[in-house]
Image: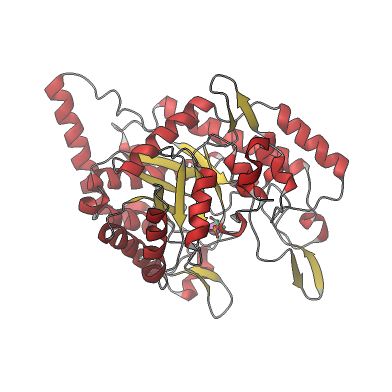
Amino acid sequence: MNPTSSKTQWSPDSWSRFETLQQPVYRDAAALKQAVDSLTALPPIVVSWEVDELKRRLGLAQRGEAFVLQGGDCAESLEDCESSHIVQQLKVLLQMSLVLVHGLRQPIIRVGRFAGQYAKPRSADTETKDGVTLPSYRGDIVNRAPFDAASREPDPQLLLRGYERAALTLNFVRALIDGGFTDLHHPELWDLEFMRHSSKYDEYKRIVDSLSDSMRFFESLTGRPVHDANKVDFYSSHEGLHLLYEQAQTRYISRCHQWYNLSTHMPWIGVRTAALNGGHVEYFRGIANPVGVKVGATAEPEYLAELIRTLNPTAEPGRLALIHRLGATKIDEALPRLIEAVRRSGQEVLWICDPMHGNTESTSTGVKTRRFDNILGELEAAFKIHHEMGSRLGGVHLELTGENVTECTGGARGLSDTDLARAYRSTVDPRLNFEQAIEVAMRISRHSSIAR
Ligand code: PEP
Ligand code: CO
């Protein structure tokens, strides 16, 4: 069925009439129904006012008046829902955003890949090891990573565990913000213990000192605190992959006569599930949230034009972000085509660059990694190409962690393939560690003239 032809028939579960990829197969239909019913009755994690406010701000980014920093783990795990992990993620995003504010002289919209990033698309439904074949690990909301039959069996109860951890995570983030953790007067609270040993620390410290000076200057000039700048906001996002989970948290808000996905502020569609006639596009077209769609190098102009018409028929600013993830070797050829295709469709989108997912490779010993130079290379090319074509890159989408991991090679410490074993913790894709993340922010902030 063509999504646009059934426009009037949208409902939170109308996606189930379409081919829907990457969904787990549960053995016990009654247990699944019971879990989805419980999830449907539970309160939402976010509210529509926040979702609308994020959309308004993303509209500014689309117009060139703000910049989006979207980042976090590739996959959250239920175990990582603990205070130090969450604080470290906030710290690295806060630090990056200070660097970006300083360089770009624009408001930064912080969107975490957190509080619900529990479902993962996989290239194969099953995995075989030593002659044993089991279902692939699809993220902690579906099954568990260890390679044994019990762990790999999709468990409907994990939908509830994921919802609960997402709510606990966002509750803690909100409390930290309300309690003053993100107060710009105390950026020293955001220091990570190991960062003082970093070669990037001096540059970071200079940026922070200069921002603090400007704030004190303004406050002494006006005799008043900089109220609005006291606290910074965070929004949540995750891949809206598991459609029963997304559907259960979809609510009709009569104040706005619209449906919202209230499990997160900004869900996105992954590249593997973004087919026009698939269940994901059908589900996403009916919700009022700002949404992202990952776009790969093979996307055709007709596909993009129809995708935009389907997901943003009223050309609402901030509604649709195209997150291109092309790879350092393909971006020069692919991005101009994408920009041209969108232009020819007569629509506007918010462009975000994900320089991670097109640059995944395996080392000779089979470890998944990404080279820092390729990540930076794709990012630099994205800024340049958008600028040359009179378009505008409005944000970045990164997999990163505030922890001192060794998952991507390169960066200021020149990590090599052999360093990866030292602190490789991701269960799915390799993330930037905090030092590499700050370096990326510093690199982006040099683009002040063309980010506008
Ligand atoms: C991801 O963001 O973790 C992901 C799977 O990305 P993509 O859909 O772009 O491959
Ligand atoms: Co990933």
Instruction: Identify the residue at image location x=53%, y=51%.
Output: 307
Residue placed most toward the observer, 294 or 135: 294
Looking at the image, residue 439 sits to the left or right of residue 365; the answer is left
Instruction: Identify the residue at image location x=58%, y=47%.
Output: 117
Instruction: Give the colour scheme of this rendering.
Output: secondary structure
Looking at the image, residue 20 sits to the left or right of residue 236; the answer is right
Residue 184 percent coordinates (x, y)? 30, 33
The quarter of the image that holds ligand 2 is bottom right
Residue 216 percent coordinates (x, y)? 18, 30
Question: In this orientation, does residue 290 appear?
Answer: yes
Q: Is 383 rendered above or below residue 373?
A: above
Residue 384 percent coordinates (x, y)? 28, 62
Looking at the image, residue 40 sits to the left or right of residue 288; the answer is right
Residue lying at the far left of the rendered structure: 221
Residue placed most toward the observer, 317 or 176: 317
Residue 40 percent coordinates (x, y)? 72, 31
Q: Is 23 rendered above or below residue 327?
A: above
Residue placed most toward the observer, 416 or 159: 159
Question: In this orientation, does residue 241 appear?
Answer: no
* Numbered label tally: 0
Instruction: Identify the residue at image location x=42%, y=71%.
Output: 330
Looking at the image, residue 174 sits to the left or right of residue 40; the answer is left
Residue lying at the far bottom of the rendered structure: 364
Residue lying at the far front of the rendered structure: 5
Q: Is 360 rendered above or below residue 42?
A: below
